[in-house]
Amino acid sequence: MPKKSFNLSVKKKINSFKKKITVDSDKSISIRSFLIGAISENISSVKNVLESEDVLSTINCLKKLGVQIKKRKSQEYIIYGKGLGSLALKKNSELNFGNSGTLARLLIGILSTTPDIQVKVTGDHSLNKRNMKELIILMSEFGAFFYPKNKFNFPLKLISTSMPIGINYKAGVSAQLKSSVILAGLNSFGETNIIEIEKSRDHTENMLIKNRHVINVRGNKKKFIKIKGKSFLNPININVPGDPSSSAFFVALTLLNNNSSIKILSVCLNSTRIGFYNLLKKCGADIKFQNLKRENNELRGDILVRSCKINPIKASRKYYVSSTDEYPILFVIAALTKGNSIFKGIGDLSNKESNRITEMQKVLKQVGVKSIAKKDELKIFGKGPINASKLKLSVPNLGDHRICMSAFVLAILTGAKAQIKNFETVFTSSPSFLKNMKILGANFEKKY
């Protein structure tokens, strides 16, 4: 069940801290584990699952599609796979994706080439505003239909194709679209070929890579992915690492808070997910990766961070691809770093849970930080450390977890008196966010 709505009130700056924490499990890998387990053969198992709203939406949708999922204990599940093309539900049923764009795009990829699917697909208020045009065009190439025609946001009616044909796709920066094509290709006749020029998250490929009869990945700078359709998938056994995107907020807080340090344990350090960390290291941030090991084709390790002075951020488009979710908190870092920071190639931020460029500009303006946005870039005139104890910071209900989390970090670093509405949206990705903030010494009040 969704968490009860509440607003968050922040009135005090945080003190120095030296702590060790474990962050929430990775959302991208958790969602993919259930989806791929559902279309694999036999029984799959997933440990250390992120039990957030987005993942619970995934489980609920799969159960409605006839997949048996059992919870063994906290954060541990077994999935009784139905195999490719075997998901089913009553005609004109409804699937609700909640707030999850990942679930929406990936499950629609699976369903578009699954026979006899006629379903209404929808989400919450935030997801229903997001543009799904590219997804609809791609799935239409496989043979699926979406109604009403020329409508590109949920709710929609999806009618799958009984004769799916593999396609050729030139992937952009969206790992979700790439994954939807991979998953649709698994149950299509012939081959689906993907050329990836700009490297994006590769969790889907990593989870499938042991199925060499189905997927072939080659190349590095330019990647070629070949999917051979109409076969079968072996069951998976996944232990989900910590989420680097959730970790980013604690990293930012530590870097900007005097005499502080933090160690974040067992975090996913996949090369497609650490653009945030690489960018900050380039700016002089004291960030180290320790105890590295590879598990389930994913690199993981501990992140050690110490507060330090960093230089203004100059982020080219290449960083956006590997740190999309972290840009709102990067904007906070830029605001509290002396000098001018610039972020290029970020136009896609306008089509997230909210327009993250516009909304973060509004947040920063309330603590006296100026910024200028163009079509595809944002310049922030950083002021360095700010004492905003006499200022008020207000964030409306945007349905955007990353904006809420970023505004919270800004408030406890500056002392701004913050009121952040509908903070429960953070539970879509990071249910232990406030618990960890309390461990670090943050003061806040929930108002129901």
Image (tube, rainbow, N blue to C red):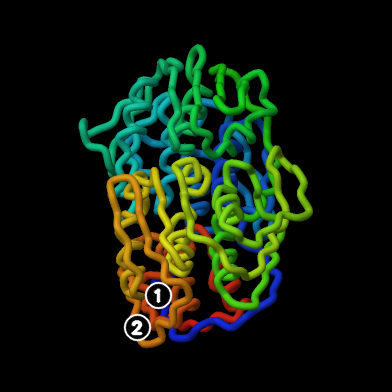
> Given the current orientation, which residue lies at the most extreme top position?
190
Left or right position of 83 against 378: right
Residue 141 placed where, x, y %? 36, 21
The quadrant of the rendering that contains the C terminus is bottom left
Asked whether the beta carbons under mark 1 and mark 2 sit within 8 Å of each other, the answer is: no
Q: Residue at coordinates 65% horizontally, 48% vertically from top-left?
A: 269
Q: CA distance from mark 1 to mark 2?
A: 22 Å
Q: Is the residue 306 above or below the residue 109 in the image? A: below
Q: Residue at coordinates 36% horizontally, 44% vertically from top-left?
A: 348
**176 or 67: nearer the eye?**
176
Q: Is the residue 405 above or below the residue 358 in the image? A: below
Q: Select label 1 or label 2 by which is in front.
A: 2
**206 or 174: nearer the eye?**
174
Query: What amino acid is at disc 2?
Result: Leu
Q: Residue at coordinates 51% horizontally, 39% vertically from top-left?
A: 66
Residue 192 placed where, x, y %? 49, 18
Kind of element beneath mark 1: loop
Residue 203 placed where, x, y %? 59, 39
Q: Is the residue 161 above or below the residue 388 in the image? A: above
Q: Which of disc 2 and disc 1 is earlier in sequence? A: 1
Left or right position of 17 against 125: right
Q: Which residue is mark 2?
A: 391
Q: Quadrant of residue 356?
A: bottom left
Kind of element beneath mark 2: loop
**307 or 20: nearer the eye?**
307
Left or right position of 175 against 155: right
> Given the current orientation, which residue lies at the most extreme front position?
339
Query: Residue 123: which numbered mark, if any?
Result: none
Q: Is the residue 123 above or below the residue 409 in the image? A: above
Query: Does residue 243 appear in this view?
Result: no
Query: What amino acid is at disc 1?
Result: Phe
Q: Which residue is mark 1?
A: 6
